[in-house]
C-alpha cells in the first residue's frame, strides 16, 4: 500500500473471512457490520426497493455508530464486501459498481446524520462522502441460498 497509515487485515463475518482496509491508528472506528438482504442497485431496481435498501443500511450504520455523528471532514477508508445470490437478481450478470453507490450514499447518511434524524425520513441521499479516500470492494463467491446474500461494510476515520 502506498499510504503507510493504511493496513489490510482479515476479519471474520459469520461464514466468511474477508479483507478489510483500515487506518493503523483510526480516530473513529472501525465500524463493521454485515447487512443481510437482497443488495439493491441504482440502475435496474425500482425506486421503492432502492429507498428501502438505503434506509436499512443507514439505520444499521447509525445504530452501530451510536448517538454522536461522525465528522465528514475526516478522511475515511471503507471496505465493501458483496455476496450475491443470483436468483435474487433474476440470474442477470451483475456489475458490482452499480451496487456500490447506493451503499456509499447510505453509509454516509448513517455516519453523518444528526442523532434525531430518522433514516426512514431521508429523501435526498446527499450526505458528503467526498472524504471517503480509499474504498476496497471485494466480491465473494455467490451465495447458495437467498438468505445468505449480504453486504459487509467497514469504515474508519482519521
Image (tube, helix red, strand yellow):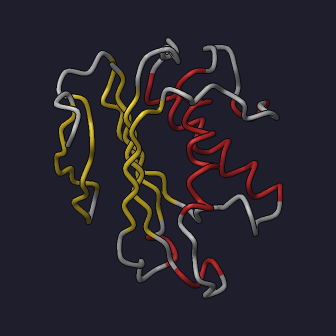
Residue 102 position in % (x across, y down): 64, 49
158 in relation to 79, above or below: above
Identify the residue at image location x=17%, y=27%: 24
Q: Nearer the viewer, residue 126 or 4?
A: 4
User: In the displayed structure, would residue 142 be above or below residue 60?
Assistant: below
Image: 11 above or below 38: above
Give the quadrant of the N terminus.
Answer: top left
Horizontal relation, residue 145 to residue 49: left or right? left
For the point 53% across and 26% down, the residue is 111
Q: Position of residue 25 (x, y in %)?
A: 19, 21
* Residue 106 drawn at (x, y percent): 61, 39
Q: Is residue 44 left or right of residue 142?
A: right
Q: Is residue 61 left or right of residue 98?
A: left
* Residue 38 occupies quadrant: bottom right
Residue 118 position by quadrant: top right
Q: Residue shown at 49%/26% (left/top)?
A: 131
Q: Nearer the viewer, residue 136 or 55?
A: 136
Residue 135 position (above or below residue 138): above
- Residue 7 appears at what percent x and percent y? 18, 38
Number of numbered tags placed on the structure image: 0
Task: Between residue 67 and residue 1, name the one nearer to us.
Answer: 1
Amino acid at each position: 500500500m502506498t499510504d503507510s497509515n493504511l493496513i489490510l487485515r482479515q476479519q471474520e463475518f459469520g461464514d466468511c473471512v474477508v479483507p478489510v482496509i483500515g487506518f493503523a491508528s483510526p480516530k473513529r472506528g472501525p465500524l463493521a457490520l454485515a447487512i443481510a438482504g437482497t443488495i439493491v442497485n441504482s440502475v435496474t431496481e425500482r425506486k421503492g426497493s432502492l429507498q428501502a435498501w438505503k434506509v436499512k443500511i443507514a439505520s444499521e450504520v447509525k445504530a452501530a455508530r451510536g448517538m454522536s455523528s461522525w465528522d465528514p471532514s475526516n478522511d475515511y477508508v471503507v471496505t465493501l464486501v458483496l455476496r450475491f445470490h443470483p436468483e435474487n437478481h433474476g440470474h442477470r450478470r451483475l456489475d458490482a459498481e452499480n451496487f456500490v453507490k447506493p451503499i456509499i450514499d447510505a453509509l454516509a447518511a448513517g455516519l453523518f446524520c444528526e442523532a434525531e434524524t430518522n433514516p426512514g425520513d431521508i429523501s435526498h441521499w446527499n450526505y458528503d462522502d467526498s472524504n471517503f479516500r480509499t474504498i476496497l470492494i471485494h466480491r465473494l463467491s455467490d451465495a447458495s441460498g437467498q438468505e445468505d446474500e449480504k453486504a459487509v461494510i467497514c469504515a474508519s476515520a482519521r
